[in-house]
Image: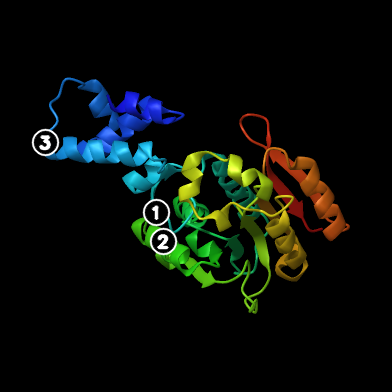
Amino acid sequence: MGAERLRASGSETPRLDAELLLCHAVGAERTVVLAHPEAPVGADAARRFRTDIERRSAGEPVAYIRGLKEFYGLAFQVDPRALIPRPETERLVELAEADIRRRLGLADRGGKPLRIVDVGTGSGAIAVALAVAVRRLGAADAVAILATESSPDALDLAKENAVSHGVADRIGFAEADLLPEDTSGGPFDLVLANLPYVRHDAMADLPRATSFEPAVALDGGDDGLEVIGRLLARLPNVLAAGGSALLEIGADQGEAIAALALDRLPGWACTVEVDLAGLPRVARISRG
């Protein structure tokens, strides 16, 4: 019944949405609910399920209704303060983790930690996922992570997620437009960013659920690269020699980001990493 209601409302994944909302209503894992379809549902859970189905029918994302989203094997608290973490962004985290492993395996740094900044952290998904990964490596003291965000509300959400995963003491947080003005701590070895990259004229064509998310976290200006371009202009002042920036981009922006990097950062290298579908997803910009 719930799936039919969602299908009629235009949900792209009505059955999955209904299953997730039923799990949320009864407080059980999806595998348990699917294994016991005949199990009775209490009156309170049934009312909650009907309410949630109506919210989803109105377009609200399932992640906001449930209050969580799985990302990189972790459960993150999500709400309208920040963009919902996307599966595509896991590719950026994979590349960053591999880069960290490589850099930690290089010659001794003289006790200096590897410095990483997650620009526009939003829910904190990238910074927290990396902090957890570094902890698993047993290298927490060898890596310093800073997360920046222009929205104080989103920054609060990022801090809450860091606390939930036990890494709040391993991440510094700064309210800033891209990067803090004070960079006296030294240059960064790795700059990470999932900044807005949707072209302004394409915003109206996005799925209805995205209208519940902060538009400022999606709208990348006329060419989709306006905010990313502002970050590129800052890199010469913040990126260490031999350092790299990993920037998430749209699937149609591979050539555009390479051209923009060539224009803004002559002499630097720019390669584009693809996702599991073979589409451009992350621009790697390296300083020689």
Name which residue lies at 81% across and 53% down.
260
Label 1 crowding class (10 Å Cα cut-off): few <14, some 14-19, many 20+?
many
Above or below, comparing residue 202 to residue 131 in the picture: above
Q: Secondary structure at mark 1?
A: loop
Q: Which disc is residue 157 wearing?
A: 2
Name which residue lies at 36% across and 59% down.
166
For disc 3, the marked residue is: 43
Above or below, comparing residue 102 to residue 178 in the picture: above
Closer to the eye: label 2 or 1: 1
Residue 121 x/y as whole percent: 53, 59
Name the quarter where the C terminus is drawn.
bottom right
- Residue 56 seen in this snapshot: yes
Above or below, comparing residue 241 to residue 70 in the picture: below
- Distance, label 2 to label 1, CA atoms, is 8 Å
- Distance, label 1 to label 3, CA atoms, is 26 Å
Label 3 crowding class (10 Å Cα cut-off): few <14, some 14-19, many 20+?
few
Q: Earlier in the sequence, mark 3 or mark 2?
A: 3
The quarter holding residue 153 reads bottom left
Q: Are marks 2 and 1 in contact (CB under 8 Å)?
A: yes
Name the quarter where the N terminus is drawn.
top left
Front residue of 161 and 45: 45
- Distance, label 3 to label 2, CA atoms, is 32 Å
Q: Amino acid at mark 2?
A: Leu
Closer to the eye: label 1 or 3: 3
